[in-house]
Image (cartoon, rainbow, N blue to C red):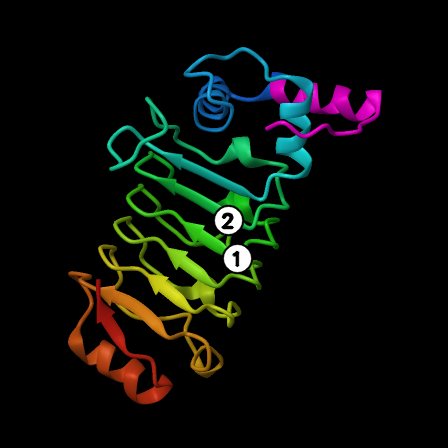
Amino acid sequence: MQFIVKTTPEELKRARKWWDDLEMQWKFAYNEAVFGKGPVIEPPKDDELMILLIRADTLRFAGPLAPNPNLSQPFNNLSGLIPLYHLRYLSISHTGIKSLLPLKRFTNMEHLFLYNNQIESLEGIENMLELKDLYVQNNKIKSLAPLRNLIKLDTVYVSGNELEKIDGLNLKHEENLKHFFVLPNEKLRQREIIRVQNELGIIGKKG
């Protein structure tokens, strides 16, 4: 990050308070994955901090078990992302996150990669009306209901979860949803796959 950000003393003060209030696990994560300083808790430079809070639209965090990790220790919640509501691309894999509720105000999101975590519900993404890609395979998700209004989705990966039915999808998804990877899901019956294909024209694929 080499850009110069013009900011007021009050804005910088608020930014510093945000950093000071962060959980330690998130200070480690930002310093390691974003600022390239390693797993330390020291505060970033003023420009680094303001660019993160104002301009950054892409973030990637991959836990130590990921193929290409950038974290030496995983975090277990998404609290550290608030208030980065301008994010359009977010990738978090191989961590211990369970809830997506902190993402409720992230309405600009277009690409969301949250695979190989401990996510139990998609509640929290229902306002991401611009979302095109959703990768949440290998979690503990039981329902797709929060997808009902996300009709710009093009690619959805929900394999390796705990789905028993394919709720949340409707005829409004048919035009844009070209890639729907829902298999395997051990509790999902073949007749449900066939129902969605016949009623909605959406083919459930393996992947």
Image location of residue 142, percent across then percent down: 31, 57
Q: Give me the residue at 48% from left, 36% from top.
A: 78
Which residue bears the numbered disc 2? 89
User: Does 161 sit above or below residue 174?
Assistant: above
Q: Residues within 10 Å of mark 2 (few under 14, many from 20)?
A: some
Q: Amino acid at mark 2?
A: Tyr
- Judging depth in this view, the residue of 34 and 194 nearest the camera is 34
Image-based side of 23 in relation to 39, left or right: right
Which residue bears the numbered disc 1? 110
Marks 1,2: beta carbons within 8 A: yes
Which residues make up the magenta segment? 1-19
Of the 4 image quadrants, the one containing the C terminus is bottom left
Asked if residue 120 lies in the magenta stretch, the reply is no
Q: Give me the residue at 34% from left, 53% from top.
A: 136
Image-based side of 102 in relation to 5, left or right: left
Asked if residue 2 lies in the magenta stretch, the reply is yes
Task: Tell me the tag on residue 78.
Answer: none
